[in-house]
Amino acid sequence: MEKKTDNHLNENPSFNSSVAVTGFAGGIIWSVIGYIAYFFNFISFGPAIVLMPWALGEWKTGPLGQWIGVVIIGVLSIGLAFLYRLLFAKINKFWPGLLFGGALWLLVFFIMNPLFKGINFIPVLDFNTLVTSFSLYLIYGLFIGYSISFDYYERSRQNEATVQE
């Protein structure tokens, strides 16, 4: 009898679809929460920040732009979820997700900062924006990371139980 390996799990289409759904849901959930934080002035920019380098016009700063930004972040988050799967899926702990979220925050606020005209450099940002955005990125990373790792662990456990029967 052929033993199912981790490689079999990585090529499993249902696991891939689970990763995609987790990524999309995480992007939507946490960008909506970011929009709420923007609405209540906890953060100085909303999800429409992803439109700033590419879209023209003032519409992108209004509600329509914010909701389109939410959807775009959801789609981009699918790719980030697969990146997490590639790097950390086998670690069923919470800390890789926190590290992933923190690394994303550093990437956006330090490296990609010149792309986003609506985000000031770190020393210029107000305290509320720094704390709120960092917290959102950490919780986003935790959500993506732990969801994918837990799913990977559960599927591996089920595969082992199937092989042993």
Image (cartoon, rainbow, N blue to C red):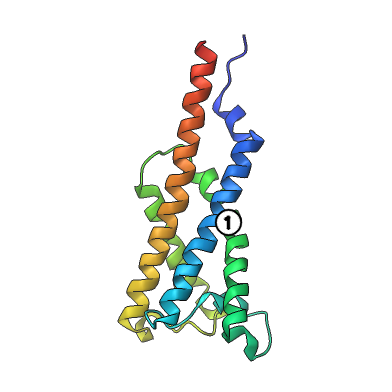
Q: Residue at x 47, y 51 (%)?
A: 144
Residue 134's image quarter?
bottom left
Q: Tag 1, which secondary structure?
A: helix
Whether residue 58 is visible? yes
Q: Residue at x 54, y 15 (%)?
A: 163
Left-right relation of 7 to 39: right
Residue 114 in the image: x percent, y percent? 53, 80
Bin the neighbour count of mark 1 within 10 Å (Cα to Cα): few under 14, some 14-19, many 20 and up: many
Q: Residue at x 38, y 60 (%)?
A: 138
Using the image as rendered, state which of residue 93 and residue 107 is in the foreground: 93
Tally of numbered tags: 1
Residue 111 in the image: x percent, y percent? 49, 71
Q: Residue at x 58, y 62 (%)?
A: 74
Residue hosting label 1: 24
Residue 16 in the image: x percent, y percent? 62, 41
- Residue found at the far bottom of this picture: 58
Residue 17's image quarter?
top right
- Identified by mark 1, the residue type is Phe
Quadrant (top left/top right/bottom left/bottom right) for the N terminus: top right
Q: Is residue 149 above or below residue 9?
A: below
Left-right relation of 161 to 102: right
Residue 59 in the image: x percent, y percent? 64, 87
Q: Is residue 59 above or below residue 137?
A: below
Using the image as rendered, state which of residue 53 and residue 150 is in the foreground: 150
Left-right relation of 75 to 147: right
Whether residue 80 is visible? no
